[in-house]
Amino acid sequence: MITSMTGFGKGEASSNGIAVSVEARTLNSRFLEIFSNLPKKLYQRDFELREIVRKKVSRGKINISIAIEYGAESETTLAKANLPLAAAYYQELQEIKKHLKLKDIVKLEDVMRFSDIFKNTETSESDEKEWKLISDALTKALDRMNQMRDQEGNELARDLNNRMKNIEKNVEKIEGMAIERIPQERQRLRERIAKLFESDEIDEQRLELEIVLLADKLDISEECVRLRSHIKFFLEALKGKEQAGRTINFLLQEMHREVNTIGSKANDATIAQVVVGIKEDLERIREQVQNVE
């Protein structure tokens, strides 16, 4: 199965005056990388967030953007003053002023410097509600992102399939040309030896041995068979249910190795042209595969 590694999705959820919006963006990466702006008070939920993403995405750089809005009807109260503590601080400041014989007046801003007079009234229950909204919105965002990635993946799969079919045709062409070359090279070798030994008798047994060795050097049937096998597995991976990115990357490396060997062994200008065409197709496929999960 082919899935693109680039995509975008947005999900929203709301309840009791709290509205959550989550955006998920994914880019190319060899591994799974997850980045999010999870609110500080919910940092302990980071592992759960990552588990939600891992169930939806196996590879890529994922950026999760979370926005939370609190309406007037929200049940969440962000902070409340500890009035007894504030009064105690004020009294202490008055004592300090009296002890140091200062003329300055103790002002409200002096008391406000003590941040602990405000206590956070958010309860674990309200945190649970917010996390529930975030997880719901995140799941929707990831699902929509994956829809986009699947659609792009289908387009990529069609292009990869067509290019691989073209490579398969060129392999057939190379096999045909290679078969025709053996008798041609045999005759060429005979003619070259005849010119070298015009006045001497040719050792037919030695000649046949040289022809056998030459034929072995020119034989590219094994490379073509392996290349056909790689193409077969590549096309099966495109249609399979599992994510195929890593598999087809490996197969492309193996194909490139076999094509290089064919080019060096064939030692023929016509075959070399076909090999160059195959390499061009493999390079285009390799570029496309960089965006496949």
Image: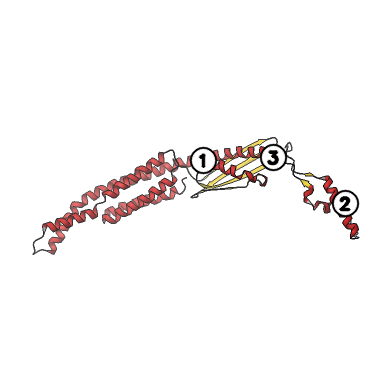
Per the image, label 3 sits on a secondary structure element best described as helix
Q: Earlier in the sequence, mark 1 or mark 2?
A: 2
Rendering colour mode: secondary structure
The label number, if any, that marks residue 262 in the structure image: none
Under circle 1, the secondary element is helix
Q: Nearer the viewer, mark 1 or mark 2?
A: 2
- Residue wearing tag 3: 124
Per the image, the residue denoted by label 1 is: 148
Depth order, front residue of 237/96: 96
Do labels 3 and 1 touch, CB within 8 Å? no
Residue 81 appears left or right of 20? right
In percent of width and height, residue 63 lies at 57, 47
Kind of residue at badge 2? Gln
x%, y% of residue 99? 90, 59
Report x, y in % for residue 276. 33, 53
For badge 3, the amino acid type reads: Ser
The earlier-in-sequence mark between 3 and 2 is 2
Residue type at mark 1: give it: Met
Q: Which mark is residue 91?
A: 2
Q: Is residue 106 visible?
A: no
